[in-house]
Image (tube, grey):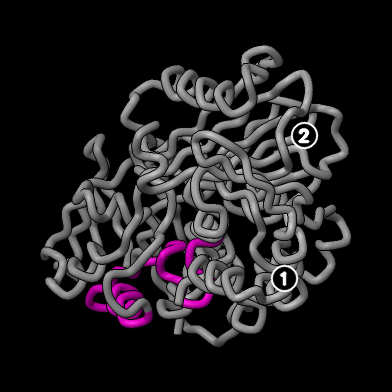
Amino acid sequence: MTRAAFIRNSLAMGIGFPFLTNFISACGRDEFQVPEFQTDFSGKVIVIGAGAAGLAAGYLLQRYNVDFQIIEASSVFGGRVKRADNFVDFPIDLGAEWIHASPAILAEIIDDPGINANIDFITYNPQTFKAWNGEKWTNHNYASNFYSEYKFKNTTWYGFFEKYIAPELLDKIVYNQPVVKIDYSGNQVILQTEDNNFYEADKVIITAPVKVLQSNIITFLPELPTTMSSAINSISMDDGLKVFIEFEEKFYPDLFVVGRFLQSLSGDDKIFYDAAFRKDSTRNVLGLFTINSQAAPYIALGSDQAIFEKIMEELDEMFEGKASQHYIQHVVQNWSKEPYIKGSYSYNFENNQEDTVNTITAGLEDKVFFAGEGLSIDNQATVQGACESGYTAVEKILT
């Protein structure tokens, strides 16, 4: 059962706040640790992608003094971990935002128990909940007794990587080099980029998002085995969108959904939320997080401006014109149009999740390995899951 399905079922059955909060906080705690092992590996490793999984892989490779390089398709590191610095007086997570575990997971990611003393967190448990059915509002404030997670207070997931993981790796990252071909037919793996640059390594870790792999942007030589390609194509990763709008005043509840409340809350389909909740800020910022079929109509509009205008139209209908009346500024992050990401995150598995993940992470001829948020069995669809999978891939190479 996926994490979202568990929460939906728990809420539907009336499982109370302490149990559900402890479950969310404990996700991955026992299973996650930075691997420790002996190695005599003396070759070179190339990591494709400088998102969470790729940076974590680089962090562990650096720790073991392995010769490595990170090849990133875009001009920045982070992938779906992205920050807006100058929007308001606190940084905004344009990608991954919630921690989805106890904050202790951050210390576990870098194997440094001291860092949590330097990071402030908020307990994210909204107090006012509503649902809009297209005509009227219904209150669901009882959910404040069930739902609680953690978020960063003064920083972001991007800030965490920027401060604690990326500094040791910056000179290892090559930017603006989309890999289009991976030839693993010889003793060395040869990578060809869009600009016709070539890189060679003994081992390669691919951390490209599932949707990129499904789009066949990267050609493999030999071709991927049928079992591998089928497993990759059986993972759902669809549209993803985040929008933040600043208003002169707060006229909205802490969290509200469009449609059925429990389904939306647990499925993360279309959720509006107070992005300034407990941020020690007087600014009023409404966030929208939407994925899959709920995000598709917005994505189909094409431009960021068209998406924003549609959302404002909806908000004006819900709140009797207050959105337009109090609007200040906005920012749109359309993850579906990012050419090297193409969507939100892994959401569902056609077949058994563990079997699917094991098929993909088995790799190709002990030369090419895969990592990413969709390839963590215990922490799927989370930043820590991406890190965990990156560490696992490195451990397979070095042991």
Residue 78 visible: no
Q: What element carries label 1?
A: helix
Given this view, does label 2 or label 1 mark the residue nearer the observer?
A: 1
Task: Tell me the quarter of the picture where residue 384 sits.
Answer: bottom right
Give the Cα separation between the discs numbered 2 and 1.
26 Å
**In terms of depth relative to the viewer, which is nearer, 102 or 384?**
102
Q: In which quarter of the image is residue 306?
A: top left
356 vs 32, left or right, is left
Residue furthest out toward the top: 325
Q: In which quarter of the image is the N terminus?
A: bottom left
Magenta stretch contains residue 380:
yes
x and y percent of residue 72 in the render? 41, 45
281 displayed left or right of 194:
right
Q: Nearer the viewer, residue 241 or 119?
A: 241
- Residue 90, labelled with which disc? 2
Q: Which residue is drawn at 67% across and 45% down?
A: 255
Q: Give the camera-side residue of 25 and 66.
A: 25
Left or right of 332? Residue 294 is left
Q: Which mark is residue 21?
A: 1
Sequence-first disc among 2 and 1 = 1
Q: Give the range drawn in magenta.
A: 354-382
Give the vertical position of 160 relative to 318 (above or below): below
Against 396, residue 60 (above or below) is above
